[in-house]
Image: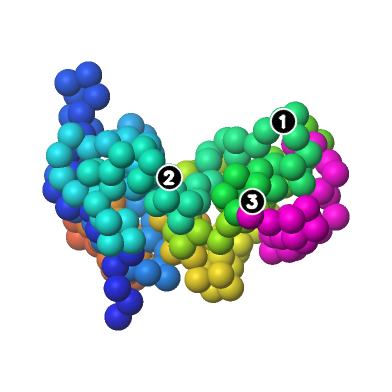
Amino acid sequence: MSKNIIEITDVFKSFDGKPVHKGINLFVRSGEIITVLGESGVGKSVLLKEINGLVRPDSGKVMVLGENTVQMDEKQLVRIRKETGMLFQGSALFDSLTVEENIAYPLIENLDLSAVEIKKAVNQNLELVDLPGIEDKYPGELSGGMKKRVALARAIATRPKILLYDEPTTGLDPPNIKRIAKLIKSMRDRLSITGVVITHDIGTAYEISDRIAFLHGGKIVFTGTVPEARETSISTFRNFLDSKM
């Protein structure tokens, strides 16, 4: 069995006195894709931000690559974030930069590469997301699905060990949803990148996940395989699944 690359233990978090996380416990195995499901507003995105240190829990431990990020200062967190890529819900591309410049940005910031090496890396990453030859285009010239794939190419540019996916298929049509799901699995299989996904799309969750977790009432109330999720007898999770079908 693979070792755990992320371990979240007894994490509590409140905003303006309102509890969001009330004792989160979750582990993620190296090399797996785990999808966190839950209703809107339960703190799924907050969980991703706790993993990469953008939000600090009020208490508890967040172990990433064997280190407790809760105790780190900003300088120490930079090192962890280099190993933890993020695919944002809105893609978050720089509109004023070309596709090549968007993908090159993390390479320039984090790696000591020549211009030729950066150009080669950009082209390789575009090929990985099935978008060769669009490096000179601007985000405004791309469809929603293409923007997601360019954002994915940027997220994997430095070859992080972990990739956090925030609603990766939101706003996409069925063909692009299938394409993104295929790419998420490809990142695991071809690049050995561990994936943590949050989504409302049950079909995508079933397709891509090694395990599924359900966040409800500030806690993870279920973790298990896709077959176990399909057959769950936990009423809150069962009701959630049935409401999405």
- Residue type indicated by callout 3: Leu
Q: Position of residue 242 (x, y in %)?
A: 35, 50
Alpha carbon distance from label 1 to label 3: 18 Å
Dot 3, how many residues are within 10 Å of its Cα: few (below 14), some (14-19), or many (20+)? many
Residue that appears at 35% across and 41% down: 53
Q: Is residue 163 visible?
A: yes
> What number is the disc on residue 95?
1
Q: Is residue 218 above or below residue 179?
A: above
Stretch in magenta: 112-139
SS for tag 2? helix
Question: Which quadrant would the N terminus be assigned to in this image?
Answer: bottom left
Q: Position of residue 99 (x, y in %)?
A: 76, 44
Q: Is residue 240 visible?
A: no
- Residue type indicated by callout 1: Asp
Mark 3, residue position? 107
User: Comparing marks 1 and 3, which lies closer to the viewer?
Assistant: 3
Alpha carbon distance from label 1 to label 2: 25 Å
Residue that appears at 57% across and 49% down: 110
SS for tag 1? loop
Mark 2, residue position? 78
Give whichever of discs 3 and 2 has the lower sequence position: 2
Look at the image and say whether residue 42 sits in the magenta stretch: no
Residue that appears at 53% across and 39% down: 89
Residue that appears at 28% across and 43% down: 72
Q: Position of residue 74 (x, y in %)?
A: 36, 38
Q: Nearer the viewer, residue 86 or 180?
A: 86
Q: Nearer the viewer, residue 119 or 90?
A: 119
Dot 2, how many residues are within 10 Å of its Cα: few (below 14), some (14-19), or many (20+)? some
